[in-house]
Amino acid sequence: DAIATLKNVYYLYPKSTAPVLKDISLEIYRGEFLGIIGPTGAGKSTLCLTLNGIVPQFYGGRFFGHISIAGKDTLSHPISDLARHVAAVFEDPEVQLTATSVENEIAFALENLKVPAPEIRARIPRVLAAVRLEGTEDKHPQDLSGGQKQRLAIASALALQPDLLILDEPTSQLDPVGAEEVFATVKHLNQTLGVTVVMVSHAAEEMATYADRLALLSDGQLQVTGAPSEIYGQF
Ligand code: ADP
Ligand code: ADP
């Protein structure tokens, strides 16, 4: 059962002459932990941005092929509509956190989506427990450790109850302890709560340990997908 499907996707950024995604076909299955690996410049971030419609709707450029998420074509549905299905966490924990308390951080996006206040109050403790940040409601996000900041960003994404959680290099700015916390949290969400995860990372060993399936991208092309043991066995 696929939650997202890409079919023969090609993409060129505006003013670019070479495609950064070339003939990508990929299904993302409900409940899986899909890891996307590959060298810098391979197109991993761009691939993530196709899933929430930012590419091509926000960037423009030239796009060929089809992508659907939860049955919706990402070319013809507004980004705000797709945002209910896909939530993303990025590399830099700082830039994602804007509120003055942990609680307000989680509430912020929900208020924008006009989620009723009692429902927001009910979701906050649930998502904080899911990322093991219970008891931090009143803390200032800037007073959290790097790993805790990323887990707060994950909690905020989770509060949106997305079909798909995308994490683009969420551990690259963290120390080893923080990185391990984030990997363990993501695995917990995936295994225990059944959250579908797409994660981009250069941390080869952790990706091999935690992902169910890896997709290797290089030079805009999907080279191979398979179990971590199969993928790493090829090098
Ligand atoms: P990765 O995440 O694998 O490092 P990216 O998706 O960030 O790869 O980038 C793929 C290619 O697209 C790179 O050559 C990068 O310079 C280029 N690129 C990324 N964003 C833009 C943009 N906004 N405009 C033009 N080119 C871009
Ligand atoms: P990542 O670390 O995920 O590969 P980058 O550091 O390549 O991301 O890019 C950071 C930001 O700069 C992204 O928003 C990306 O779209 C933009 N960017 C990257 N390459 C280019 C480019 N050649 N032209 C314009 N914007 C770019």
Image (cartoon, helix red, strand yellow):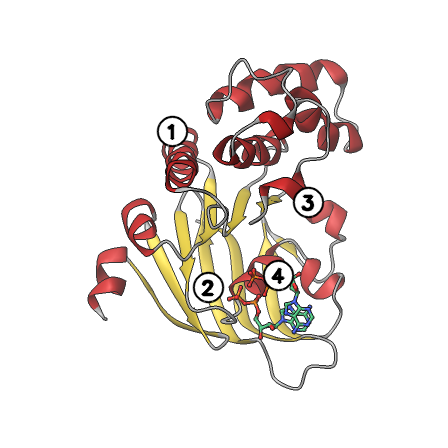
Question: From the Cβ of disc 4, is ligand 1 less than 8 Å away?
Answer: no
The three-letter code of the residue at mark 1 reads Thr
Which SS class for mark 3?
loop
| Disc number for residue 192 | 1
The three-letter code of the residue at mark 3 reads Ala
Q: Nearer the viewer, residue 67 or 183?
A: 183
Residue at x-position 34% and y-position 48%: 211
Label 4: how many residues lie within 10 Å, few (<14), some (14-19) or many (20+)? many
The three-letter code of the residue at mark 4 reads Thr
Residue hosting label 3: 83
Label 3: how many residues lie within 10 Å, few (<14), some (14-19) or many (20+)? some
Which SS class for mark 2?
strand
| Disc number for residue 26 | 2
Residue 25 at x, y = what percent? 48, 69
Residue at x-position 67% and y-position 43%: 95
Residue 201 at x, y = what percent? 43, 54
Q: Nearer the viewer, residue 92 or 38?
A: 92
Q: Quadrant of ligand 1?
A: bottom right
The three-letter code of the residue at mark 2 reads Leu
Q: Quadrant of residue 45?
A: bottom right
Q: Nearer the viewer, residue 129 or 138?
A: 138
- Which comes sooner in the sequence, label 1 or label 4? 4
Label 1: how many residues lie within 10 Å, few (<14), some (14-19) or many (20+)? few
* In the image, residue 107 above or below residue 138: below
- Which comes sooner in the sequence, label 1 or label 3? 3
